[in-house]
Image (cartoon, grey):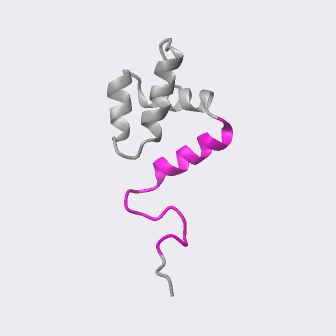
Amino acid sequence: MAKTAPPLTPEQIARVIEVAWDDRPPFNAVLRECGLSHGQVVALLKREMTPNAFKTWTARTRTPKGQPTSPQAGRPRR
């Protein structure tokens, strides 16, 4: 179980979510910038995001870079 996140302002929470959604910086950038562990970031996002948005985020973070996110995305058009 992850330790609870330190108290964060609404602006800091918004920044964590923004950086976590961004594809450019690696996930470790969120950890370094905010001083949170991986589990704390996941717990924070789960608490602050809607269930559907959190599910989408976890699916995005598990997709290897360069892989299409849907089966149809990588197919050439005829």
Residue 3, visible in the rendered structure = no
**Tag count:** 0
On the image, the x and y values in percent for residue 2 come to 50, 24
Which residue: 34% across, 25% down? 33
Q: Quadrant of residue 52?
A: top right
Residue 61 can be seen, yes or no: yes
Q: Is residue 19 left or right of residue 26?
A: right
Nearest the eye: 59 or 14 = 14
The residue segment tinted magenta is 50-74
Q: Is residue 54 magenta?
A: yes
Question: In the figure, is residue 28 to the left or right of 8?
Answer: left
- In the picture shown, does residue 56 fall above or below 27? below
Residue 76 at x, y percent in the picture: 46, 81
Q: Residue at x 50, y 61 (%)?
A: 69
Residue 42 in the magenta stretch? The answer is no
Residue projecting furthest to the top? 7
Q: Position of residue 58 (x, y in %)?
A: 54, 45
Residue at x-position 47% and y-position 40%: 21
49 versus 65 height, above or below: above
| Rendering coords of residue 41 (x, y %) | 48, 29
Residue closest to the far bottom: 78
Q: Is 48 placed above or below 21 here?
A: above
Q: Quadrant of residue 70?
A: bottom right
